[in-house]
Amino acid sequence: MDFDFTEKEQAFRAEVKQFIADNLPPPEQRDENFEQQWHAKLGEKKWIGFSWPREHGGGGGTLIEQFILKEEMSKAMAPDLGSDFMGLTWVGPALIRHGTEEQKKEFMPDLLNCRSSWCTGYSEPDVGSDLGSLKLRAVRDGDDYVINGSKIWTTKAHVAKYIFLTVRTNPEAESRYRGISVLLTPMNTPGIEVRPIVNIVGLHHFNQVFFTDVRVPVSARLGAEGEGWKVVMGALANERSGISESTGMERHLEKLKDLARKSFKGGKPALEDAEVRRKIARFETQIAAMRLNGLRNLTKQIKGAQPSSETSVNKLLRGKLEIPMSDLAMGLLGNEATGMGEWQHDSFNFHGTVIGGGSPNIQRNIIAERVLGLPKD
Amino acid sequence: MDFGFSEDQEMLRDQVRKFLDDQCPLPQVRTIAAGPQGYSPDLWKQLSELGWLGLTLPEEYGGVGLDWVDLVIILEETGRTLFPSPLVSTTLAATAINAYGTAAQRQQWLPGLASGSHIGTLALLDEIDFLSPEAIRMTATSSGDSYRLSGQKRFVQDASAADVFIVAFRSGAADSDIGLAIVPAQQSGVSVEDTPGWDRTKRTGVLTLEDVEISPDALLGGTMLGAHAVETLVDRGALAVAAEAIGVCEGILSLTSQYALDRKQFGSPIGRYQGVKHPLAEMYVDIECMKSLVYYAAWTLQGEPDEAPAAIAKAKAYASESVCSAGVNGVQLHGAIGYTDEYDMQLFIKRSKWSRATYGDEDFHYDRVATFGGL
């Protein structure tokens, strides 16, 4: 056990810090072209897809170096590493693991250059937490699949170039988990219609997507026919660990401390209130645990394990942090809580990040069934 | 950066686990806990032969020369099996003497503590249950080049088993006037009384000193060490109890998960129902977090000493809260059987209450986390 970073890792951290100092303008000076220019610079450094193997166009960095890169970027309030969060967090790793050479050649370069953008088709109107019962039907017709049905809660479907689409290729399979396949589908394929759904804070992020006789070549299938569940489980583990990194929580915590420092409770400074202090200390402790859990998982991955059920632990912690943190902030705001502002917005918006990737109760089921060996519902 | 155990450490864990499962399963724990001594002298001798007692002490004093990350491995397992012994107390007393003692004091005491011929413990707390330097009230009077001590120390772990005490006292009002005395149990004016408690696998007592002489040789380090030494020892105690608490939670999770598989109601194992499986999943999450926080805290002692107090405060705060809820949920998920004397769950909930309080509960440590975090 050794938490010291090696000289090479420390040198890399210094390089990242220097790059940020030289290239990242403060938030108020970032114009509309900023993100594109920033991502071009990151691409030159090979810092997008940094931990992917060089043979697939990645940077060949270690997982620890990738961790350092993300940590420093988050501290500096830099945008995400790359504009295509879904593509980079789970589509890319799934392509590296399951893709054919042709698929890698077709999709990887654009992914790494931020020229593509992906959305993900999992949920359906009647299929949410019970993803294994998905119905969107793909019928084989010669060298094509013909797709009919609908996906819902599809974030970014209205702007994405491709969809990482789960379909049912065999409704008669012996297990419902065996008849699922993944199709890498361009969103401009005829027969796809996107209808916006406005979210709780009035924004258009997700959609319902309709598929009517959509034809996709068999070569678009990722992995073997009927073996899509394995692909999806790996992608979901990457999604859960990707959206459950402690760096974002650390930023919320600093904001919460700043708010507490200037707030009052019962006419006295809020920081004189033992309950406020302990609640914040508890968040800080949970965030520390989340960061260390992440490092323990990285250690396992470095030794060869694929991310799996352990990613549900940090996903659950995120749920225990974001909503309660915004609750405490809203309490500190008093009547201001009825107005508009960052915490007011977050107190609604955090529900999306907590539910996305599988609600907390689903994470509890995963741990109880796959780790503790309890019977399925 | 490597957040994993080495092969040697995994072997140590296997060895400890096998020893405890073979030599001290829960029926044996009950027998020992029902006895007057609260530990088994025979097993104690075997611990010394296995090297656990002097694990973190230097080899020149008969120790093994390993660090607290290794010790944590042993403590997780002693927690999981509720192993009753003065291992933690003796380790803490030895840690105090090794860290602060003069060469002569180390030579005098450490070989015996490493071999198990001495059983040591810390006696820090006064009448009030408040773990801070200002709560040390026992005040020495000067007598020539010696001090004389009178008063009581409460919540002394393994007080009846111990033959040497590390006693915190003060000679004046300042934090720098705090010192630690090495007080043998047989010294004139020293007496001990066992305090009744629910967890008989962890014995606590009151140490009474009546005009006990503290010669210059008995003053730890030969000087008044100041409040910092006491804080450091409280931290070590908190870390040790947090490490054992991981095991306690693992014991509860294992017992309760098995029960949830075996017990059938409404035609199905109760572990199928989310009202049962979700609290068990939460227990697993807590255990994973406790491990991360405790392993890191143990590493800071050697790797990043300035970080240790904050890391330990987080570890013990989280452990106190988690072990408490694991005890409660463990009994509740069992139902009536968990409320009986005969079934083992009762042993675990009793330990959970002890673990939560000892060396600071979650409120105490969250207050420290807040201060360390700049609030």
Image (cartoon, coloured by chain):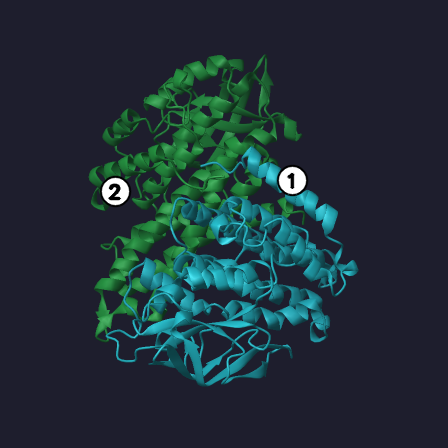
- At which x and y percent is residue B108? 42, 15
Q: Height in image: A75 above or below B52?
A: below
Residue count near mark 2 (Cα–Cα under 10 Å), binned few <14, some 14–19, many ≥20: many
Q: From the image, which quarter does the C terminus of chain A lie in?
A: bottom left
Label 1: chain?
A
- At which x and y percent is residue B345? 29, 54
What amino acid is labelled 1 in the image? Ala
Per the image, the residue denoted by label 1 is A14
Q: Which chain is green?
A: B
Q: Which chain is cyan?
A: A
* Camera-side residue of A326 and A271: A326
**Residue A92 left/right relative to A168:** right
Marker disc for residue B29: 2
Q: Height in image: A238 above or below B206?
A: below
Q: Quadrant of residue B261?
A: bottom left
Q: In what element is the residue under mark 2?
A: helix
Residue A331 in sight here? yes
